Image (cartoon, helix red, strand yellow):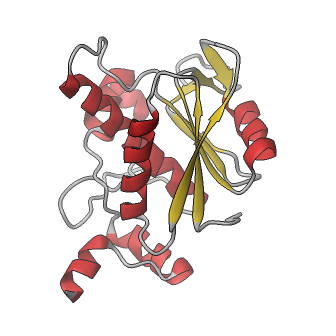
Amino acid sequence: MQENSSTLNIVRIGGYITFSSLKEVGNRILESFQGIIDEFELSHHDAPLLDSVDAYLLTTILHEEFGGHTLGITDADLKTNDEDEFYNSIFGGKNPQNDVAVVSTRKLGPTEINSKSDYDLYIDRTLKVSLHEVGHNFGLTDHGSYKVARNGSLCPMSKGEFNKFGYWGYVRVIIDGRGLNFCDECTYFLKNMYGYKSQSAKLLEH
């Protein structure tokens, strides 16, 4: 499903991340999806303070409340029904029955955020996981291999092997290694489905 894809609803669940930071994330998502997502709207979802929440349930609630193309960002841990505890906590996920994706910031920041550089790193990681999940909303699939964009950074859809690194190793190797530009394979798919032109292609035209 790609319903109302030109507008992205960005919904804060919890209060740790600021609206100014959400606006920064939204603007950078627009840059990565130029010609596909034209605008974003910021909203807040009132929810009880929880350490964790079921990812599928949260996407269902956000779909009922906001509908359309939605990205939820929460500071709660996102849980799945995987029996293996190693895999039942996720950085982000997309509901296959609608156009709602969710991202958890719980494991994206440094252990302690004591400086602007710490906070900037936290926002950068949030953006990169958000790009990955929004990519799923547009039909992009995970890259098991380490595919790179033309600027040398990992494609936002690179997933790699989670069990090879563990949580913090995965964050530092895969999430930190992702860039904001898509690889040729993803760019080809987006171009054929939505008329997308990558940022590098736009630069070559000018």
Horizontal placement of 204 versus 168: left or right? left
From this viewpoint, which residue is outermost toward the front? 20
Q: At 19% from the left edge and 27% from the top edge, which residue is drawn? A: 117
Nearest the camera: 83 or 5? 5
Q: At 27% from the left edge and 38% from the top edge, which residue is drawn? A: 176
Where residue 159 appears, x then y in whole percent?
41, 45
Task: Find residue 44 and report its image quarter.
Answer: top right
Nearest the camera: 106 or 157? 106
- Measured along the vertical axis of the image, is residue 109 above or below residue 65? above
Task: Find residue 180 and report its image quarter.
Answer: bottom left
Where residue 114 appears, x then y in whole percent?
24, 13
Which quadrant is home to the N terminus? bottom right
From this viewpoint, which residue is outermost toward the right? 64
Horizontal placement of 195 versus 181: left or right? right
Visible residue check, residue 97 = yes
Which quadrant is home to the C terminus? bottom left
Where residue 87 appears, x then y in whole percent?
55, 25
Q: At 61% from the left edge and 19% from the top edge, which residue is drawn? A: 84
- Measured along the vertical axis of the image, is residue 172 above or below residue 186? above
- Measured along the vertical axis of the image, is residue 18 above or below residue 63? above
Q: At 24% from the left edge and 23% from the top edge, which residue is drawn? A: 118
Where residue 59 appears, x then y in whole percent?
71, 39
